[in-house]
Amino acid sequence: MKKLEEVLQDWEAVIGLEVHAELTTLETKMFCNCKLEFGAEPNTHTCPVCLGLPGALPVPNKAAIESIVLAGLATNCDIEKRSMFYRKNYMYPDMSKNFQITQGPVAFCMRGHLDLEVDGAAAKERIDIPEAKEGSYVAHIGIERIHMEEDAGKMIHIGGDEGRIAGATHSLVDYNRCGTPLIELVTQPDLRTPEEARLFMQKLRQIYLAIGISDCSMEEGSLRCDGNVSLRRRGETKLGTKTELKNMNSFKNLHDGLAYEICRQAEVLEEGGIIYQETRHWDPSAKRTIVMRVKETADDYRLFPDPDLAPYDLSDEFIENVRKRLPELPDEKAKRFEETFGLSAYDARHLVEHRATSNFFEECMKEASAELAKPLANLIINDVAAYLNANPEVDLTESNLSPARAVELVTLLSKDVISSKQAKQV
Ligand code: ADP
Ligand code: ZN
Ligand code: MG
């Protein structure tokens, strides 16, 4: 198989993401009073509503509607005042109702976008953008919608390999997760490289964390992503047939899975083959994607308005009250860091990537003089962030490196009392 770089010379990759986030910071489920709790004893947080017992009636969780509106406002979406809940019908053991409540053609949030600043090695992949050659460009990524739905339960397969269904002797089901409020964001097919897809996910995660609607843990599955990808010859405007990679559970898997799939599709097409619209699974250890199923179409789900849930009529007052809760978003914070402390756009952007490092920087700047901003940013972006990445259990606010000590260290460094190597050691 050819390398990604080589493939992208002749082919343009077209990528769209579907991102699910569980609203883990809420107290209760989407349509009942059951408690939301990760890791509880199986089947202890269930009731007739989330199990779908006959006659049980759903009542929407107002806080969940506030959360999705907040997500929409933070991603430049229009908030639709009138929208409805639908039933998506299918049968699977982890969903005892036999339908999932979701939204129809009109979702609470429509027509948003995020802008990605791409630089470094990643920028070079966009051979179609002249300024990318100089090292950076901005990608404008459209968001089709963010809709509200509920999560299914969880299957646990016993006796198979690594908990997989293949080879299992029997399966258990835990309904604690069913009915968990879930928001699904669907992008336009505007992404062009695996790196842009990764940056989009990282940025979205920063935003969701900043507005506090989810703990966004990709390992625990509260943030999940499906990657859709197709190829077309450079210069072609028609979209090619896409495949969908399911449940990419880390930024690296998302990137590597898409990169592999782009190279695989190029090989098939260059050999005169055709791409089937199918769902594929990325196997990180084998480094390949395998077919899971041929794609079902929307018709298969018999979507229809849920007769138990009245259409929504959000008031201006409701929307404005949610808008008041919008905190400073990562982009705004980066802008402020640039303007207040004279940092470069690059430094500011990397400082706000994590709340821990941006808070730490601000604490430092309360005690530091203006000329220390740049060396402090360097210390935090390079050394502190690398340390935190390598030691995820460390809480910076409780570590030995207090803001006062960091300022002292950078002061010694800037006066050449110690070398940068010694500073690293400290
Ligand atoms: P489906 O009906 O298969 O769910 P959608 O039209 O709902 O497809 O799109 C799902 C996701 O796939 C969206 O993020 C969209 O941008 C992306 N997408 C749609 N068509 C293509 C394509 N030809 N190539 C790549 N991505 C695509
Ligand atoms: Zn319940
Ligand atoms: Mg779809």
Image: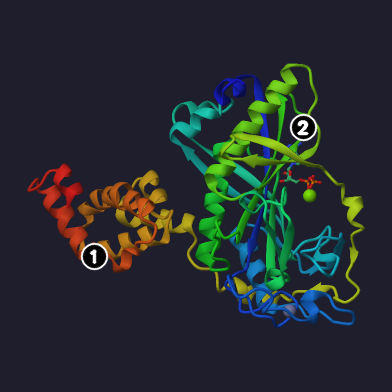
Label 2 CB-ligand 1 distance < 8 A: yes
Measured as percent of width and height from the top left, residue 67 is found at 63, 70
Give the residue number, with chain letter if any, for mark 2: 239
Q: Which mark is residue 402?
A: 1
Viewer-nearest of labels 2 and 1?
Answer: 1
Is residue 192 in view from this perspective? no
Label 2 or label 1, whichever comes before in sequence order: 2
Q: Mark 2 packing: few (<14 Cα in 10 Å), some, or many (20+)?
A: few
Residue placed at 77% from the left, 30% from the top?
Answer: 240
Q: How is the image coloured?
A: rainbow
Q: Quadrant of residue 84?
A: bottom right
In the picture, the quarter occupied by the N terminus is top right
**Amino acid at pointer 2:** Leu
Foreground: 37 or 211? 37
Q: Quick check: 393 left or right of 319?
A: left
Measured as percent of width and height from the top left, residue 91 is found at 86, 60
Residue placed at 60% from the left, 59% from the top?
Answer: 221
